[in-house]
Image: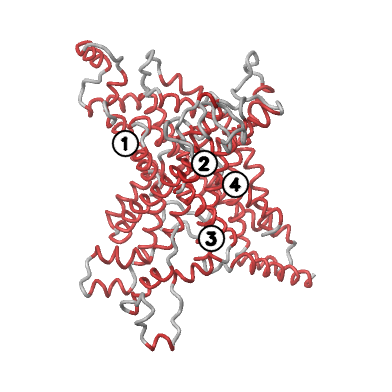
Amino acid sequence: MTEYLIRRIAQSVVVIFLITIVTFLLIHAAPGGPTQMMLSPGLTPEVMEQQAKNLGLDKPLPVQYLKWVGGLLQGDLGYTFKNHLPIGELIWPRIGKTFILMGSAWLVSILIAIPWGIYNSTKVYGLSDQTASFISYLGFAMPTFWFGIMLQQYFSLKLDWFPLSDMYSRGHEGEIGDLFMHLVLPVTVLSLGFLASYMKYARASMLEVLDQDYIRTARAKGVVERKVVFRHALRNALIPIITLLGMDLPILVGGAVLTENVFNWPGMGRWYVEMAISREYSVLMAITIVTAVMVVIGNLLADILYSVVDPRVKLGKQGGKTA
Amino acid sequence: MSIDNTGLSGALSSQSTGPAPLDPKPVPPADSVVKRPPGPWVMLWKKFSRNPFAMGGLIVLLFFIIIAFLAPLLTPYDPAAIDLMNANLGPGATDHLLGTDELGRDIFARLLYSARISLLIGFSVALASVVIGSVIGAISGYFGGWVDTVFMRIVDVMSSVPTLFLNILVMAIFGTQIKYMILILALTSWMSIARLVRGNFLQLREMQYVEAAKAIGVSNWDIIFRHLLRNASFPIIVNATLMVGGAILSESALSYLGLGIQAPATSWGLMLSNAQEFMLIDPLQALYPGLCILVVVLAVNFIGDGIRDALDPRQQGIKSRRRLDKWRKTYSKSEN
């Protein structure tokens, strides 16, 4: 276990290292590179050179890269080009706001999707199952931002039940009730996407377990169907579901780009798009790295979780994931 | 989606029977006596055409392809022509079928021309990812060893990069052009096909006909691309079909964010981002483009699922499944 963990962590470090290289190269492959974007246009070449020198942009690429990675290792995410603000201080509040939005959507969809998926697995092709599969199809095919716009039009412009956008109404900053009203519409939009995949997954996972020999044995012994489903099948079916939830952890930090833009939610996703349009390269690099680290950590956690929930899984042994 | 029964089934069955006659005339008499089993493509089509959802999806998709091609014939208006005198007309007000937007552009014309962009991007992204994914997956699975390790690590890294973030980054850096969009969408979606093809090749390379081919001196290149890839083609098709829908969604998302298609070109996503700004004036404007995206993506997904079900020997269609269910129910009732 320890040996496996060390190897997995080493692998993760390599992956993150590769991602830093790719991000750095991408930014510097841009026509004109970051230099042109950073410096105000219309300056004389001498002034431009002087400015580039101040920002460290005149040094060769490997030196710039090492400087950047060195900063990252010390927790320094760099500074914005405009106004020269520290990115680290700007990024954390935004991650928090995204986390509130995504966390609520995630919880809501888990609470609906998993019991519903389990119920549907006991009544395959029933009315509830058909409805669920219809919703899944919609969830996979509907552009989330369009769904958001439609909800805005109906529930805030026409019925005026919920506020149109933003996180708090003016003058109500920090009030839980106000926050809740602002959360309803974006959470509905985000939940549909989660719901579609979780429900399908929970159902498939249950069906696979229900098909196994020991379930047949339990039924043959005369165990009540309710007990078969909840005691015997559910425990094993939950294992892959928990893994899936673990894999989705990083989405909680960066996953709501479109919804945040529709509802003007002041989180990471909207910030990222704003910064992309105004070409704040150092911010883009910082956000990409932060999200990538989250993804890698999430995957690692999912793996560990898997072995904790399922004692049959012996991590690190060849072919250990067989039942 | 072209399903060319005779040509492809002929080409496939030629593996065992030598050059298959595509023309019905020179068929040898032996064939007319012993009825040849239908080729895999014919079988696939037979099962596929029995699935109402899949057929519905196919018809809808064909419909959209046709209107995309015939766009100039279906509307007299130029989708980019600005006519401020006739801005914000409601549907059916004048001879503008669905009205005009805030700059007086005909909405119906814009919808038609947007179908071109979406379908173009959907299909080219799927095609490009199939090419990248199958080449990398094939080489990886066939040769194994360090080649496999290197390629699969690349796949791991690519899969752990948040896709939408990377797409936004590239579009912001390189500028918003269709070729860059197709390229980056393909570069961020080929991994699933690579994994799939590699898995298939790990099995296929142990087959005896591969050994036989090697023994008579067929080159590795020919074994991979002429013998093995053909056997992995069905799962690739399923995956690629579902990818078309994903690419259309990604395109609309990027255009909506202002990092995709730019005016004067039009796209459903771009129309939505305009419509959201003028939501108070004309709420209907946001409805049409979103519906178009939804319907096209649903159609493509139904087709993909239909092909997958048709290929799955365990699936005998929903009807017989229902009948089996009914039978089971009555059976268990009689037990109680």
C-alpha distance separating marks 4 and 3 = 16 Å
Q: Nearer the viewer, residue A88 or B304?
A: B304
Kindly identify which chain the residue marked by label 3 belongs to.
B
Q: On what subunit does the disc labeled 4 rest?
A: A
**Residue A66 numbered tag:** none
Are the residues flagged by discs 2 and 1 from a single subunit? yes
Q: Is residue A90 left or right of residue A149?
A: left
- Callout 4 secondary element: helix
Q: Which mark is residue A22?
A: 1
Q: For mark 4, does the 10 Å Cα neighbourhood hold few (<14), some (14 to 19), or many (20 or more) residues? A: some
Q: Is residue A239 left or right of residue B202?
A: right
Q: Amino acid at mark 3?
A: Gly
Q: Secondary structure at mark 1?
A: helix
Give the Cα separation between the discs numbered 1 and 3: 38 Å
* Disc on res. A138: 4
Q: Which amino acid lies under the numbered mark 1 shown in the image of this protein?
A: Val
Residue linked to disc 3: B306
Circle 4 or circle 2, nearest the eye = 4
